[in-house]
Every structure is written in structure tokens, then in C-alpha cells.
Image: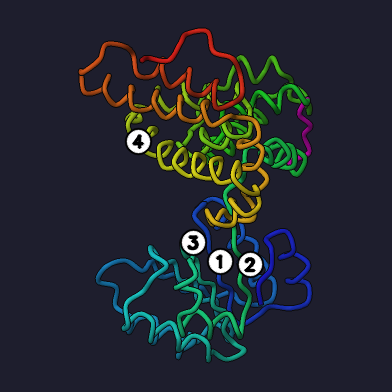
Amino acid sequence: MKIYPEKLAAELKKGLARVYLISGDEPLLRQQVCDQIRADARSAGFIERDLFHVETGFDWQELHYSANSLSLFADKKLIEVRLSAAKQPEKAAKALLELANVGEDLVVLLSLPKADASVQKSKWFKALEAVGVLVQVWPIESKDLPRWIENRFKDKGFRIARDAVLALSARVEGNLLAAVQEVDRLILAAPATEISLEMVQATVGDHARYDVYQWLDAALAGKAGRCLRVLNGLQAEGTEVLLVTGVLTRELRTLIGIKAQAQAGSLEAALQSARIWPKRKALISRVVQRLSLDDLQAIHGAVRAVDAIVKGVEPGEPWDVMANISMRLSGHRIVVPFPK
């Protein structure tokens, strides 16, 4: 059975499952879900706990022995297995498959990175999901981070002002561990139960982490301010500018193809032909309608100029050109012309 993390508490009230699969690429969120299950299991009498960190060279006989024995001091046990990779070799898969047959005196808690389609179709994964509960955790998107921070303060009996939570979100975006640490630090330092903007500005440094796809999505969505902020963050983090242009070049080829086909036919048919994911159709549609074919080709030419600048063939500052590209992609007029 597959459930969302926010539905886990209600599901636990119905009783413990034999197996829990916690999958996702955000370790902190996986840990929080595991903490919730672990606490509920302890309350239900599963006092004994065997913890296994599975890495290269792990002895799977240890897991087999744990699943088939109880100590003299407890009649219920929680077996927690933390996989360093979702995809597992044959020997590991066989050992994991055996966990689908554990008795009522055992609860298995399996934590692993994001399980792609091939992992979810594997025999061991399907067998465990069939007798247990799958909880998939996803990274918190920037638009959802303020609410997540507000709820974290609320759970601890504190309130944070709206302007303060927006400022804090901007400073910890993409770095959930830093967000948790700053929330806890602000609570310890707070003279009252409300966190103000002044407190955030005075005590919280910039811990934000960005990736190229955040920049691209902001540009395509027409969010110029966020797009430039992410671009500056990438530059400050030492990201290679050619990594950014590589991602953009692939996207531009797709956009130019869609625009050209849409002019000769229908936009929907062009999107279908380009195999655009359903979730991105609205975003790509707006971009294609906002920018002309000349705009897209000019941006593509500017990307080639960045490559020439990096290689020393042309003079200029590549990140300045990328800022201009960001503005044009976002649908805003640029002040500095693109390199010829």
C-alpha cells in the first residue's frame, strides 16, 4: 500500500504494518518518517531494535539471523535497515525478499534513496510493498518551504511573522538541514514566542543551495527575480557555467522545435510530438506563446557565445551573458545586447 507522508499518522492509528518502505532523496524527511514509525512501534511494545547500515561488503546473514531470532528479554522486535542505494544486487534482493515473510512479532523498517520504476518493479520491492506500507518522500519545493517552516515553529509552540518566514525561506532554500538548525537556533534565542523579521535578518546567514533546474524552471515560469537569485547562487557556489548552458541548450532545442511545429500546425500536437511530460505542458505552452521563434534563436545564439567566451575565443563575462539570457527567457527586456 502506498501512502503520502502526511497520511502516515492516521494509518499508524489503525495498527502497525509488518513492513514499512521509506523511499526518497531527502535524508532529513526520510528520518522524520522513520522516527514517527519507530516511536509508534516502541509504544506498541517493540522495544528491541536491530539497526543495519547496508553498504558494500554487508553480511546479509546478519539480517537473516536477526529476522529469525528474538532476545530473551523481548518478544517483539523492530528491524531497521538503511540501504545506501535503492538498486540492489541479486544476493541482497534475495535477503530482502525474505523480509516479506516476517511474523507478527517483527516490524521491518526499510529506508532507501528514491526508488525509480525499475526498483519498484523488482521482485523484492513488490513483495515488501504487498505486505506493508510504502511512504515516498519528496524534496520540499520552494513554494512549499514557508508553510513547512511555519508548521515546524507551530509544532514547538512558536509563531513566525510572515515577512520573517519568507526571509528565512530564501536563506535556507534547498538546504533542509540548515532550515531545521536555524529554526531550532531561533527558538533558543527568542525572547518571546514570536519570531520577527529583525531576528532572522540579524542571526540567519545565507545557507541556500540551488541547482540548474531550479534556475531553468524559474526562467521558463517568467520569474525574473527568482531566476537571477538562483543564477547568482549557482555562480557563488562555483557551478561551472557550461553546466548551466548544457542544460539550457537541450531545453532550447526542444522549445525551438515546438515553436516551429506549432506555427505550422497546432501547439498541442507539437507538445505531444516533443513528448513533454503532462506536468510541464502548461509551463512549456506559456513559454512558447510568450517568446517568438526569433527570441528563442537569439537566446540560442547567446548560449553559443557563452561557450566561446569560456574558451577564450571571444571577450566578455559569461555570467553577465547568462543574466541577460535569464531576463530574455523570463520575458523581460534586457539592457545589454546579446553578443553577436
Q: Is residue 156 above or below residue 28?
A: above
- Residue that appears at 56% across and 53% down: 276
Give the foreground label among 2 and 4. Answer: 4
Amino acid on which the number 1 mark rests in the picture: Ile
Which residue is at the far front? 264
C-alpha gap between disc 2 and disc 1: 10 Å
Quadrant including the N terminus = bottom right
Q: Earlier in the sequence, mark 4 or mark 3?
A: 3
Image side of residue 264 versus residue 256, left or right? right
Residue topped by disc 2: 37
- Residue 58 position in % (x across, y down): 29, 73
C-alpha gap between disc 3 and disc 2: 19 Å
Magenta segment includes 51? no
- Residue that appears at 33% across and 27% down: 304
Residue 144 is marked as: none
C-alpha gap between disc 2 and disc 4: 40 Å
**Extent of the magenta region:** 156-161
Amino acid on which the number 2 mark rests in the picture: Ile
Residue 114 is marked as: 3
Amino acid on which the number 4 mark rests in the picture: Leu
Quadrant including the C terminus = top left
Are discs 3 and 2 less than 8 Å apart at CB?
A: no
Amino acid on which the number 3 mark rests in the picture: Lys
Image side of residue 56 versus residue 100, left or right? left
Residue topped by disc 4: 243
- Residue 257 position in % (x across, y down): 49, 44
Residue topped by disc 1: 22
Are discs 2 and 1 less than 8 Å apart at CB?
A: yes
The 10 Å Cα crowd at callout 2, few under 14, some 14 to 19, many 20 or more, is many
Name the one closer to the observer, 51 or 313.
313
Give the foreground label among 2 and 1. Answer: 1
Name the one closer to the observer, 189 or 216.
216
